[in-house]
């Protein structure tokens, strides 16, 4: 696929700021107009989708994470971005001539827009794409493969907690005889965890995926992967004991971090949810055998807490409360210790 240099005004930061403002105001019509005007000016649709819509979506999420936008504003902005993408896609017609691809987000994966951008980019390159959307349960994905017989499955995973499900999906697709191209930052830097989970290929961006599928598909069969190393005893224990782990941590939190006594009901719920994220990221880290997954998560959480004026001490205490319950699990303890050591000192 040809790589185009961003043209003005797409290369102009002020243009992106203006689009972000419209998206943040929920001004769907003006945002759509901006994108369609670019298309009329000859800017390739894939550049508008990836640079403008994709780039803006990353900023939308960051504004939410930085506590500058509420979750409602983020959701509304995401919806506008999706509508603009659909409006653009409706303007571009490419007759399918390459083959058929099933594109799905892994079960529990709600970051749907990156996969949607990929779907439209592949369509423009001549693939017939069945886009199944966010959070597709494995069995439904496999049923779809049996019904449609695609040449590839493209599997999107933006967050590592979904990697065990991604592994199940990849294994099932390969067993059904359909090679898998994986993508999304959940698969780790350079897609290294995609390979460990048995994907046939990985691509970092929609453009790389287009190139990979056009030049080298189907790929030579991927080597057998050591599935037995994935999801060991520690992982299984952690997943099974998740509810108790969270409840006990919540019960002990008051003694370890007295500020929690002043929390309102909403803050208590958010804290319980945070313990759920800790358990899920730790489980994913154990599953893949990669402590970095958990350390990236805690480092990011520390930055989000700081943005919300919550002391990082709360996170440190939370991690210790989880650690205290896992003393018989050496890999979990090692991972938690690394994450605790990473946290900024008070
Ligand atoms: C927007 C966003 C959200 C929105 C999602 C809205 C939506 N409906 O999509 C909201 C605010 C709801 C959200 C929620 C959460 N998020 Co979020 N989110 C983001 C953010 C800022 C942008 C994602 C995005 O859309 N980027 C724009 C796209 C276009 O960029 P892109 O990645 O370059 O896309 C390309 C590639 O990924 C590739 N690609 C994607 N899929 C596929 C598939 C295949 C087969 C191929 C080949 C390629 C491919 O092609 C795309 C186009 O070129 C990212 C951080 C970031 N800067 O990316 C965090 C991020 C993904 N989120 C994160 C987290 C932790 C969460 C939450 C758990 C937060 C929480 N505590 O609740 C939840 C989980 C929700 C869930 N269960 O899925 C983390 C993931 C952790 C990690 N270590 O990787 C990230 C990385 C933030 C961080 N830590 O820095 N999030």
Image: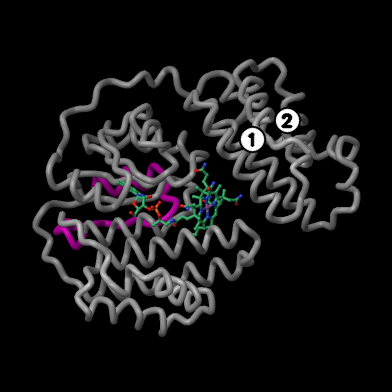
Which residue position is annotated with label 1?
Answer: 279
Residue drawn at (53%, 59%), measured in percent from left and top?
61
Residue drawn at (37%, 31%), measured in percent from left and top?
192
Please, what secondary structure does the residue beneath circle 2 have?
A: helix
Pinpoint residue 263: horizontal percent, then vertical percent.
85, 53
Which residue position is annotated with label 2?
Answer: 322
Residue 211 part of the magenta-drawn span: no
Density class for disc 1 (Cα within 10 Å; few <14, some 14-19, many ≥20) is: many
Q: In the rendered structure, which segment of residues is drawn in magenta?
A: 123-146
For residue 291, what is the image quadrant? top right
Residue 131 part of the magenta-drawn span: yes
Pinpoint residue 18: horizontal percent, then vertical percent.
45, 77
The span from disc 1 to disc 2 (Cα, nearest Å) is 8 Å
**Residue 111 or 54: which is nearer the viewer?**
54
Mark 1 Cβ inside 8 Å of ligand 1? no
Please, what secondary structure does the residue beneath circle 1 have?
A: helix
């Amino acid at each position: 696929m040809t790589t185009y240099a961003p043209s003005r005004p797409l290369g102009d930061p002020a243009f992106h700021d203006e689009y972000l403002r419209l998206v943040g105001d929920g001004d769907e019509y003006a945002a759509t107009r901006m994108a369609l005007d670019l298309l009329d000016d000859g800017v390739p649709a894939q550049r508008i989708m990836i640079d403008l819509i994709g780039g803006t979506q990353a900023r939308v999420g960051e504004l939410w994470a930085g506590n500058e936008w509420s979750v409602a504003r983020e959701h509304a902005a995401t919806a506008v971005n999706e509508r603009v993408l659909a409006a653009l896609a409706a303007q571009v017609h490419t007759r399918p001539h390459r083959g058929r691809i099933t594109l799905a987000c892994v079960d529990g994966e709600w970051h749907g827009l990156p996969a949607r951008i990929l779907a439209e980019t592949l369509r423009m390159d001549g693939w017939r794409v069945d886009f199944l959307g966010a959070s597709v349960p494995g069995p439904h994905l496999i049923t779809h493969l049996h019904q449609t017989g695609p040449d590839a499955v493209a599997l999107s995973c933006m967050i590592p907690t979904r990697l065990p499900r991604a592994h199940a999906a990849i294994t099932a697709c390969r067993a059904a005889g359909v090679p898998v191209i994986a993508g999304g930052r959940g698969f780790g830097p350079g897609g290294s965890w995609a390979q460990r989970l048995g994907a046939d290929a990985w691509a970092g961006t929609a453009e790389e995926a287009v190139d990979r599928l056009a030049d080298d598909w189907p790929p030579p069969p991927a080597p057998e992967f050591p599935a037995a190393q994935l999801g060991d005893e520690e992982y299984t224990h952690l997943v099974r004991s998740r509810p108790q782990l969270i409840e006990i941590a919540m019960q002990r939190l008051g003694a370890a971090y007295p500020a929690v006594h002043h929390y309102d009901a909403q803050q208590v719920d958010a804290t319980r949810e945070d313990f759920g994220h800790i358990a899920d990221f730790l489980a994913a880290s154990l599953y893949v055998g990669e402590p970095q997954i958990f350390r990236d998560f805690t480092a990011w959480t520390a930055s989000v807490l700081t943005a919300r004026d919550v002391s990082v001490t709360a996170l440190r205490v939370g991690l210790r409360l989880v650690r205290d319950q896992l003393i018989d699990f050496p890999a979990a303890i090692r991972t938690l210790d690394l994450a605790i050591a990473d946290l900024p000192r008070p």
